[in-house]
Protein backbone atom coordinates (compact mmCIF):
# COMPACT_ATOMS: atom_id res chain seq x y z
CA UNK A 1 0.00 0.00 0.00
CA UNK A 2 1.44 3.36 -1.04
CA UNK A 3 0.02 6.29 0.90
CA UNK A 4 0.73 10.01 0.48
CA UNK A 5 -0.18 12.28 3.39
CA UNK A 6 -1.31 15.77 2.33
CA UNK A 7 -2.14 18.77 4.49
CA UNK A 8 -0.84 22.08 5.79
CA UNK A 9 2.19 22.28 8.10
CA UNK A 10 1.00 21.11 11.52
CA UNK A 11 -2.16 19.44 10.18
CA UNK A 12 -1.08 16.19 11.84
CA UNK A 13 0.41 14.36 8.82
CA UNK A 14 3.41 13.11 10.77
CA UNK A 15 1.33 12.02 13.77
CA UNK A 16 -1.01 9.99 11.57
CA UNK A 17 1.77 8.68 9.29
CA UNK A 18 3.63 7.17 12.25
CA UNK A 19 0.43 5.45 13.48
CA UNK A 20 -0.34 4.09 9.99
CA UNK A 21 3.23 2.84 9.55
CA UNK A 22 3.00 0.95 12.86
CA UNK A 23 -0.42 -0.54 12.07
CA UNK A 24 0.39 -1.68 8.53
CA UNK A 25 4.12 -2.43 9.15
CA UNK A 26 5.34 -0.23 6.34
CA UNK A 27 7.99 2.50 6.57
CA UNK A 28 7.11 6.09 7.41
CA UNK A 29 9.17 8.28 5.09
CA UNK A 30 9.33 11.95 6.06
CA UNK A 31 11.47 14.25 3.94
CA UNK A 32 11.39 16.78 6.81
CA UNK A 33 12.82 14.14 9.22
CA UNK A 34 15.50 13.19 6.65
CA UNK A 35 16.51 16.85 6.25
CA UNK A 36 16.55 17.38 10.05
CA UNK A 37 18.72 14.27 10.54
CA UNK A 38 21.15 15.65 7.94
CA UNK A 39 21.20 19.03 9.68
CA UNK A 40 21.94 17.32 13.01
CA UNK A 41 24.76 15.28 11.43
CA UNK A 42 26.18 18.40 9.75
CA UNK A 43 26.12 16.98 6.21
CA UNK A 44 26.35 19.10 3.05
CA UNK A 45 22.71 18.28 2.26
CA UNK A 46 21.71 19.38 5.76
CA UNK A 47 23.62 22.65 5.43
CA UNK A 48 21.88 23.46 2.13
CA UNK A 49 18.41 22.37 3.34
CA UNK A 50 18.68 24.46 6.54
CA UNK A 51 19.08 27.67 4.54
CA UNK A 52 15.58 27.14 3.10
CA UNK A 53 13.88 25.52 6.11
CA UNK A 54 14.89 28.32 8.49
CA UNK A 55 13.17 30.79 6.13
CA UNK A 56 9.97 28.74 5.92
CA UNK A 57 10.67 27.97 2.25
CA UNK A 58 10.63 24.64 0.48
CA UNK A 59 13.94 22.93 -0.22
CA UNK A 60 14.50 22.94 -4.03
CA UNK A 61 13.18 19.92 -5.96
CA UNK A 62 16.71 19.25 -7.25
CA UNK A 63 17.89 18.42 -3.71
CA UNK A 64 14.73 16.60 -2.65
CA UNK A 65 14.13 14.27 -5.58
CA UNK A 66 17.46 12.39 -5.61
CA UNK A 67 17.20 11.88 -1.87
CA UNK A 68 13.70 10.42 -1.95
CA UNK A 69 14.22 8.27 -5.05
CA UNK A 70 17.21 6.67 -3.32
CA UNK A 71 15.04 5.99 -0.24
CA UNK A 72 12.36 4.20 -2.34
CA UNK A 73 14.97 1.77 -3.63
CA UNK A 74 15.61 0.34 -0.13
CA UNK A 75 14.31 -3.20 0.58
CA UNK A 76 11.91 -2.10 3.35
CA UNK A 77 9.84 -0.23 0.71
CA UNK A 78 8.92 -3.46 -1.11
CA UNK A 79 5.43 -3.62 0.46
CA UNK A 80 4.69 0.09 0.29
CA UNK A 81 5.18 3.14 2.51
CA UNK A 82 3.55 6.21 4.03
CA UNK A 83 4.98 9.41 2.56
CA UNK A 84 4.87 12.42 4.86
CA UNK A 85 5.94 15.78 3.42
CA UNK A 86 6.60 14.38 -0.06
CA UNK A 87 5.48 15.17 -2.71
CA UNK A 88 5.15 18.85 -1.96
CA UNK A 89 5.18 20.42 -5.42
CA UNK A 90 3.61 19.42 -8.73
CA UNK A 91 7.06 18.50 -10.22
CA UNK A 92 7.69 16.24 -7.20
CA UNK A 93 4.27 14.57 -7.66
CA UNK A 94 4.92 14.09 -11.37
CA UNK A 95 8.34 12.56 -10.62
CA UNK A 96 6.74 10.16 -8.13
CA UNK A 97 3.97 9.19 -10.57
CA UNK A 98 6.55 8.56 -13.32
CA UNK A 99 8.85 6.51 -11.06
CA UNK A 100 5.93 4.35 -9.92
CA UNK A 101 4.47 4.02 -13.42
CA UNK A 102 7.82 2.68 -14.67
CA UNK A 103 7.29 -0.22 -12.23
CA UNK A 104 3.57 -0.64 -13.06
CA UNK A 105 2.61 0.90 -9.69
CA UNK A 106 0.72 3.97 -8.41
CA UNK A 107 -0.14 5.93 -5.28
CA UNK A 108 -3.10 4.07 -3.75
CA UNK A 109 -4.33 6.80 -1.39
CA UNK A 110 -3.56 10.50 -1.00
CA UNK A 111 -5.01 11.37 2.42
CA UNK A 112 -5.65 15.10 2.84
CA UNK A 113 -5.74 15.98 6.55
CA UNK A 114 -7.82 19.14 6.51
CA UNK A 115 -7.13 21.75 9.24
CA UNK A 116 -7.87 25.48 8.78
CA UNK A 117 -4.95 27.93 9.06
CA UNK A 118 -6.45 29.44 12.27
CA UNK A 119 -5.79 26.18 14.17
CA UNK A 120 -2.27 25.70 12.86
CA UNK A 121 -0.33 28.39 14.73
CA UNK A 122 -1.87 27.26 18.05
CA UNK A 123 -0.84 23.67 17.36
CA UNK A 124 2.69 24.56 16.34
CA UNK A 125 3.37 26.61 19.47
CA UNK A 126 2.68 23.53 21.62
CA UNK A 127 4.55 21.00 19.49
CA UNK A 128 7.56 19.23 21.03
CA UNK A 129 9.77 17.00 18.87
CA UNK A 130 12.37 14.32 19.36
CA UNK A 131 15.26 14.90 16.98
CA UNK A 132 16.62 11.42 17.74
CA UNK A 133 13.69 9.19 16.68
CA UNK A 134 11.25 11.67 15.08
CA UNK A 135 8.61 11.35 17.85
CA UNK A 136 6.11 14.22 17.88
CA UNK A 137 4.08 15.43 20.86
CA UNK A 138 1.92 18.37 21.89
CA UNK A 139 1.98 19.87 25.38
CA UNK A 140 -1.84 19.89 25.50
CA UNK A 141 -3.27 17.60 22.82
CA UNK A 142 -0.72 14.76 22.80
CA UNK A 143 1.57 15.12 25.84
CA UNK A 144 4.52 12.80 26.47
CA UNK A 145 4.29 10.55 29.56
CA UNK A 146 7.16 12.53 31.18
CA UNK A 147 7.30 16.24 30.43
CA UNK A 148 10.11 17.10 28.01
CA UNK A 149 11.15 13.46 27.40
CA UNK A 150 10.40 11.30 24.34
CA UNK A 151 8.14 8.30 25.12
CA UNK A 152 9.90 6.18 22.50
CA UNK A 153 13.64 6.73 23.06
CA UNK A 154 13.98 8.83 26.26
CA UNK A 155 15.75 11.68 24.40
CA UNK A 156 15.04 15.29 25.33
CA UNK A 157 12.19 16.95 23.41
CA UNK A 158 12.82 20.27 21.65
CA UNK A 159 10.90 23.03 19.87
CA UNK A 160 11.68 22.96 16.14
CA UNK A 161 13.50 26.05 14.81
CA UNK A 162 10.83 26.49 12.13
CA UNK A 163 7.92 26.41 14.63
CA UNK A 164 8.34 30.09 15.56
CA UNK A 165 5.05 31.88 14.67
CA UNK A 166 6.69 34.18 12.07
CA UNK A 167 8.23 31.16 10.26
CA UNK A 168 5.00 29.14 10.53
CA UNK A 169 3.20 31.98 8.68
CA UNK A 170 5.76 31.74 5.86
CA UNK A 171 5.39 27.95 5.74
CA UNK A 172 1.62 28.39 5.36
CA UNK A 173 2.20 30.74 2.41
CA UNK A 174 4.54 28.18 0.80
CA UNK A 175 1.92 25.47 1.45
CA UNK A 176 -0.92 27.40 -0.22
CA UNK A 177 1.26 28.41 -3.21
CA UNK A 178 3.15 25.20 -3.90
CA UNK A 179 1.59 22.23 -2.10
CA UNK A 180 -2.17 22.79 -2.01
CA UNK A 181 -2.38 22.27 -5.83
CA UNK A 182 -1.56 18.60 -5.10
CA UNK A 183 -5.11 18.18 -3.79
CA UNK A 184 -6.43 18.69 -7.34
CA UNK A 185 -3.59 16.61 -8.77
CA UNK A 186 -4.50 13.55 -6.69
CA UNK A 187 -8.22 14.12 -7.17
CA UNK A 188 -7.64 13.78 -10.92
CA UNK A 189 -5.55 10.64 -10.24
CA UNK A 190 -8.55 9.21 -8.32
CA UNK A 191 -6.46 8.75 -5.14
CA UNK A 192 -7.64 11.71 -3.04
CA UNK A 193 -9.50 11.15 0.24
CA UNK A 194 -10.28 14.02 2.65
CA UNK A 195 -10.40 13.68 6.43
CA UNK A 196 -11.27 16.25 9.10
CA UNK A 197 -8.00 16.90 10.96
CA UNK A 198 -9.52 19.15 13.64
CA UNK A 199 -10.84 16.30 15.79
CA UNK A 200 -8.89 14.12 18.29
CA UNK A 201 -5.83 12.24 17.03
CA UNK A 202 -7.52 8.83 17.51
CA UNK A 203 -10.69 9.96 15.72
CA UNK A 204 -8.64 11.16 12.72
CA UNK A 205 -6.79 7.83 12.73
CA UNK A 206 -10.04 5.81 12.78
CA UNK A 207 -11.40 7.75 9.81
CA UNK A 208 -8.21 7.12 7.80
CA UNK A 209 -8.22 3.39 8.63
CA UNK A 210 -11.89 3.18 7.51
CA UNK A 211 -10.89 4.73 4.17
CA UNK A 212 -7.94 2.38 3.68
CA UNK A 213 -9.97 -0.70 4.58
CA UNK A 214 -13.24 0.18 2.80
P1 LIG B 1 8.07 18.85 7.46
O1 LIG B 1 8.86 18.30 8.56
O2 LIG B 1 7.48 17.93 6.46
O3 LIG B 1 6.99 19.82 8.08
P2 LIG B 1 5.48 20.17 7.61
O4 LIG B 1 4.93 19.55 6.42
O5 LIG B 1 5.50 21.64 7.62
O6 LIG B 1 4.66 19.46 8.63
P3 LIG B 1 4.91 19.39 10.10
O7 LIG B 1 5.90 18.32 10.44
O8 LIG B 1 5.22 20.77 10.63
O9 LIG B 1 3.47 19.03 10.62
P4 LIG B 1 2.60 17.71 10.52
O10 LIG B 1 1.48 17.91 9.57
O11 LIG B 1 3.45 16.50 10.35
O12 LIG B 1 1.97 17.77 11.96
P5 LIG B 1 2.32 16.95 13.28
O13 LIG B 1 1.84 15.55 13.17
O14 LIG B 1 3.72 17.18 13.70
O15 LIG B 1 8.95 19.91 6.62
C1 LIG B 1 9.72 20.90 7.27
C2 LIG B 1 10.46 21.70 6.20
O16 LIG B 1 11.33 20.82 5.44
C3 LIG B 1 9.57 22.37 5.15
O17 LIG B 1 9.11 23.63 5.57
C4 LIG B 1 10.54 22.46 3.96
O18 LIG B 1 11.44 23.53 4.11
C5 LIG B 1 11.35 21.17 4.08
N1 LIG B 1 10.77 20.06 3.28
C6 LIG B 1 10.29 18.88 3.77
N2 LIG B 1 9.87 18.08 2.77
C7 LIG B 1 10.08 18.78 1.62
C8 LIG B 1 9.85 18.50 0.25
N3 LIG B 1 9.28 17.34 -0.15
N4 LIG B 1 10.18 19.44 -0.66
C9 LIG B 1 10.74 20.60 -0.29
N5 LIG B 1 10.98 20.94 1.00
C10 LIG B 1 10.66 20.03 1.94
O19 LIG B 1 1.32 17.71 14.29
C11 LIG B 1 1.54 19.07 14.65
C12 LIG B 1 1.24 19.25 16.15
O20 LIG B 1 -0.17 19.08 16.36
C13 LIG B 1 1.94 18.22 17.06
O21 LIG B 1 2.30 18.84 18.24
C14 LIG B 1 0.86 17.13 17.28
O22 LIG B 1 1.05 16.45 18.51
C15 LIG B 1 -0.42 17.96 17.23
N6 LIG B 1 -1.54 17.24 16.66
C16 LIG B 1 -1.53 16.33 15.63
N7 LIG B 1 -2.78 15.91 15.36
C17 LIG B 1 -3.60 16.58 16.22
C18 LIG B 1 -5.02 16.56 16.43
N8 LIG B 1 -5.84 15.78 15.69
N9 LIG B 1 -5.53 17.38 17.40
C19 LIG B 1 -4.71 18.17 18.15
N10 LIG B 1 -3.35 18.21 18.00
C20 LIG B 1 -2.81 17.42 17.04
Image (cartoon, helix red, strand yellow):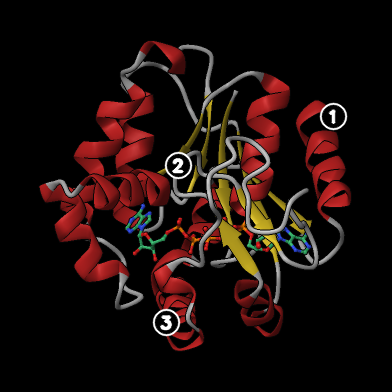
Residue depicted at x 42% and y 72%: 162
> Whole-percent x and y of residue 55?
30, 78
Q: How far apart are labels 3 and 1 at the CA level?
A: 38 Å
Residue depicted at x 64% and y 18%: 25
N-terminal label among 2 and 1? 2
> Whole-percent x and y of residue 107?
52, 33
Answer with left or right where residue 146 lies relative to residue 31.
right
Q: Is residue 119 above or below residue 211?
A: below
Which residue is denoted by mark 2 in the rendering? 132
Q: Is residue 212 above or below residue 194?
A: above
User: Which element carries disc 1, helix, strand or loop?
Assistant: loop
Answer with left or right where residue 59 lies relative to residue 211.
left
Label 3 crowd bin: few (<14), some (14–19), many (20+), radius 10 Å: some
Quadrant position of residue 119: bottom right
Viewer-nearest residue: 69 or 45: 45
Viewer-nearest residue: 97 or 69: 69
In the rendered image, the quadrant that contains the C terminus is: top right
> Whole-percent x and y of residue 21?
63, 29
Label 1 crowd bin: few (<14), some (14–19), many (20+), radius 10 Å: few
Label 2 residue near ligand 1, CB within 8 Å: no
Amino acid sequence: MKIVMLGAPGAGKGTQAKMLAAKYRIPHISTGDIFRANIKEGTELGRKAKEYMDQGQLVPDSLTLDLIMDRFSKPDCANGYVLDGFPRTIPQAEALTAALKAKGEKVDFAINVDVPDENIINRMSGRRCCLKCGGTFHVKYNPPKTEGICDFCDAELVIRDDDKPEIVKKRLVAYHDQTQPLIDYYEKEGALRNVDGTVDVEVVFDSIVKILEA
